[in-house]
Amino acid sequence: MLTKIKDLAQALAPRLIEIRRHIHSHPELSGQECQTAAYIAGVLSSCGLIVQEAVGKTGVIGELVGGTDERLVALRTDMDALPISELTNLEFASRHPGVMHACGHDVHSTLGLGTAMVLSQLGEALPGNVRFLFQPAEEIAEGASWMVQAGAMNDVTAVFGVHVFPSIRAGSVGIRYGALTAAADDLEIIIIGESGHGARPHEAIDAIWIASQVITTLQQAISRTHNPLRPIVLTIGQISGGRAPNVIADQVRMTGTVRTLHPETHASLPEWIEKIVSHVCNTYGASYEMNYRRGVPSVQNDLALTQLLEESAKQAWGNERIQILQEPSLGAEDFSVYLENTPGTMFRLGVGFKDKLNYPLHHPQFDVEESAIVTGVVTLAYTIYQYWQHGS
Ligand code: NI
């Protein structure tokens, strides 16, 4: 079966590159993926899949009907682009000013379509059904929730995901056991003091100074009160307050992002942060408002499915092209939303050039070595096929 899958994928390579370039030159922002969705729906229909459009706003689902094994596999790929002006000079560069597929979601969509094309050609040899999820709005970390709320994960017994990775050479895949990405939450703190003359601090409550104490205490307390093996990144990215050089500020607003890997640490954070904020504010007579918004959880790859993926990828490409990733990323990825009730695993597909500079994700000159598309399609199609060969 592996040889057959490889042959099918190889034969489709020119068509897949054409698809990737088409999607790349017509990028659409999160939640606005209408043309992309219609294009994807068209390709899926032409392969004989049952297609559902406008799932969770602009998402698309393609259902491929296989044999009688009741275990239903889902493959999730994302479709949205970023508000970046492309500077690659590629002939198929973005035709939409200020919008660019700089995170490789054009490749992800192509991988979803390529896997659907390959598996749809297996005919009766496909043991069960596969659901292809083409998700909108990953970049704003909302699309996965839209899809799940629309029922996209109903009856799914395993879900797979993939993200391109420029620092791994094309032809190789990166596999990670356990946490792949971090939970990302949003934080807003408003410190409310009392205004006064800049020369008479004892008659006022200086919100700027108290805000600086809050930030310092938070950063120090992370290092002294948390398990260092369970990292926390707390970044205050925005701060504003005050009206004039000689007037003590009565209010400061700060916003930030909080990243964690460990679910228990993630759960404990809002209370922990509020304790520090309230303690500092009480000490100096200020009051505060705090808003903590839970973002996406950490992607935690399922052990058995990751082993299946590793085994399948090794059979397909040999041990030397499989990298077991030693470190997670503190970036966020809403694939984790699919994992809340279903086991799954996501891997990193190497797209790095051999003899050309590799720009990072979200860079205006980001590009991929397109030969990686076949690597990705074979890895996904063969892993999905192998899923039914193993006991549940
Ligand atoms: Ni991405």
Image (cartoon, rainbow, N blue to C red):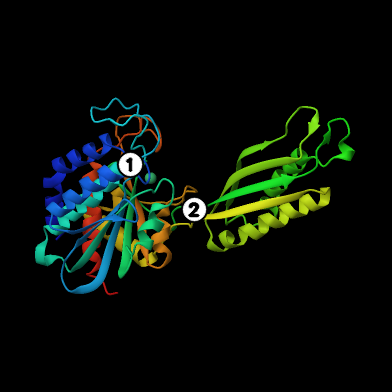
Residue 178 position in % (x across, y down): 44, 60
Residue at the image position 80 percent from the left and 42 percent from the top: 194
Label 1 sits on what residue type? Gly
Q: Answer few, some or many: residues within 10 Å of disc 2's Cα (few below 14, many 20 plus, some between 14 and 19).
A: many
Circle 2: element type: loop
Q: Is residue 187 at all visible to an observer of this figure?
A: yes
Placement of 371 over or under 232, stated as above or below = above
Which quarter of the figure has residue 81? top left
Q: CA distance from mark 2 to mark 1?
A: 19 Å
Quadrant containing ligand 1 reads top left
Residue at the image position 80 percent from the left and 31 percent from the top: 247
**Number of numbered markers:** 2
Label 2 sits on what residue type? Ala
Q: Answer few, some or many: residues within 10 Å of disc 1's Cα (few below 14, many 20 plus, some between 14 and 19).
A: many
Q: Which mark is residue 104?
A: 1
Question: Residue beneath label 2, please?
Answer: 182
Residue at the image position 72 percent from the left and 46 percent from the top: 191
| Mark 1 CB near ligand 1 (8 Å cut) | yes
Instruction: Answer with left or right where residue 43 lies relative to residue 31.
Output: left
* Nearer-N-terminus badge (2/1): 1
Which sits in the foreground, 329 or 105? 105
Placement of the N terminus among the 4 image quadrants: bottom left
Cβ atoms under marks 2 and 1 closer than 8 Å = no
Which quarter of the figure has residue 119? bottom left
Residue 111 position in % (x across, y down): 24, 49
Q: Is residue 376 at all visible to an observer of this figure?
A: no
Placement of the C terminus among the 4 image quadrants: bottom left
Instruction: Answer with left or right where residue 323 lies relative to residue 214.
Output: left
Which sits in the foreground, 295 or 363? 295
Residue 19 position in % (x across, y down): 19, 41
